[in-house]
Amino acid sequence: MLRIHFTADDLARTTLAAEPDPLWEVLLSLHMLQVDDDPVAYGTWRQRMRRTLPRETVGPLAALAPPVGYSPDFLTPSAQSSGLDHALELMLSVPRHQLRSDLSRLSTRRTAAAWVRQLAEARPETLHRLGHSVRVYHREALAPYWSSLRSAVQLDNRRRMLQLTAGGVASMLEAIHPQARWRGDTLEIAAFADEELQLNGRGLRLQPSYFCWRDPTKLLDANLSPVLVFPIQHATGLLQQAKEDADTQERLSALVGKTRAIVLALTIEGATTTQLARSCNITLATASHQTAVLRDAGLIESRRQGKSVIHQATTLGIALLDGRTP
């Protein structure tokens, strides 16, 4: 059982990411690519990737990301990044001593031993190859699906924020996994091996992930900034490519009208009536009418915040936008 010990400072510094982390999604999707678990959520994506991804890209990465056991911490930098380019910069600038230490813990297949040994020596050409492989993998395996993946993570984030509002921090922490329990000042998660993690005022970054399957995960090195990656609650098992998203939006526009479809799409991240009117180039009265129709249909929720009204797409509304069964 993992026991994460919080102080008052840790609770004050605990954050919940609203966006997927590109390198955690790279790592965890590589895990899922190598197994056949959860065919509903990942089956279609996995079949496509196994047919189309170049072996020269997947091979070096799979050697560093076995689906069972340890994957090197440096592949997922503990510092929060602002995008793929920044994340790769953090990964490739890892101190040499950490690189060697991480790779020494890796159970390496014989066929990959030379590659891992060269990487441990921090040779520029091997670091360049690693960065190039990650970039190609992200471009081919994740980028076409990123909008759909990002929407799923953002929806999960909103659920967590509602839990935080309704029940407090302990309630939100317990809800990240069925085996998570809050006791005193400690978060216990039975899905882990026996370990004590002292945050010591550093706080904890909670990172929701689409490709994290079944159980949370974290960095092995307790001296790194603490990160707990947990699986989102999948509203649906399908990732959609950008072209599929566009086709779905066209079909939705034909069904409910272009303006109403755009208004619904704009409420995914929340928007005021004024923002909707400006974005759609319509009057405030028209925007209010459109939101009333969507609200009556159960596709959005509206709540007052100060002098404004915030409109937010519901689970049903997001499923309709994505062309999926709620």
Image: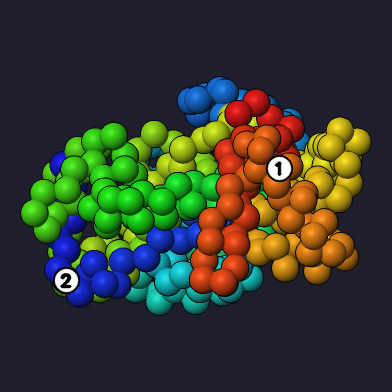
SS for tag 1? Answer: helix
Q: Amino acid at mark 1?
A: Leu
Visible in this render: residue 235?
Answer: yes
Residue at image position (65%, 26%) is 325
* Quadrant in the rendering for residue 237: top right
Numbered badge on residue 294 = 1
Q: Quadrant of the C terminus?
A: top right
Foreground tag (2 vs 1): 1
What residue appears at the point 57 percent right and 71 percent down from the top-left corner? 307
Q: Is residue 114 visible?
A: no
Find numbered disc 2 in the image and state the secondary structure of the residue it sits on.
Answer: helix
Residue 67 occupies quadrant: top left
Query: What amino acid type should be assigned to the residue bearing mark 2?
Result: Ala
The residue where tag 2 is placed is 8
Q: Residue at x 54, y 56 (%)?
A: 303
Label located before the other in sequence (2 or 1): 2
Please indicate whether residue 11 sits to the left or right of residue 297 in the image: left
Identify the residue shown where x is 41% and y is 55%.
161
Q: CA distance from mark 2 to mark 1?
A: 42 Å
Q: Is residue 1 left or right of residue 311?
A: left
Q: Quadrant of the N terminus?
A: top left
Q: Residue 122: where, in percent of width, then height?
A: 48, 71
